[in-house]
Image (tube, rainbow, N blue to C red):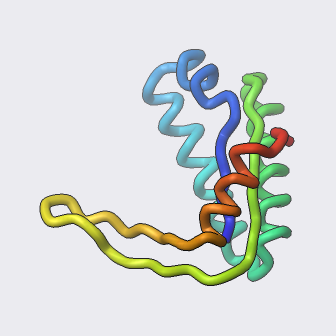
Amino acid sequence: ILYADIVGFTKLSSSCTPEELVVILNKLFGRFDDIAMVRNCVLMGLNMCTAINKLREATRVEVSMRVGVHTGNVLCGVIGLQKWQYDVWSHDVTLANHMESGGLPG
């Protein structure tokens, strides 16, 4: 279970045009898609931090990544009647989320 957050996203989004932001995010998430082929969540999280560090160097905007990783059981499903949403639940998911939100960027 991997949770990740772009720290400094608000500053990034206010320092460029919407079009520039879409281009930056598309490049970043494209890198994340490539990284997602890794079968090890810890390595994936580290690679995501490296990718955002490269983005920071390229844009000179102070952004970073906070990652939380945990293993365990997951219950998942699609919820909603009008707008479907895929979601995951469990104590282990909550723990990974707390690890991300309470962690240090970098």
Q: Quadrant of residue 58?
A: top right
Which one is in front, 102 or 5?
A: 102
Residue 61: image x %, image y %? 73, 23
Against 56, residue 38 (above or below) is: below
Closest to the observer, 9 or 34? 9
Q: Residue at x 78, y 33 (%)?
A: 56
Q: Residue furthest front?
A: 91
Residue 40: percent from left, percent from top? 79, 78
In the picture, residue 6 is in which quadrant? top right
Residue 37 position in % (x across, y down): 69, 77
Q: From what the image shows, is residue 86 above or below residue 7?
A: below
Quadrant for residue 64, please give it: top right
Q: Residue at x 78, y 61 (%)?
A: 45
Residue 3's place in the image compared with 72, above or below, is above
Q: Is residue 28 left or right of residue 100?
A: left
The number of numbered discs placed on residues in the rendered structure image is 0
Residue at point 13% right, 60% down? 82
Where the C terminus falls, by quadrant?
top right
| Residue furthest left in the image | 82
Which residue shows up at 61% across the image and 48% down it?
Answer: 27
Viewport quadrant of the N terminus: bottom right
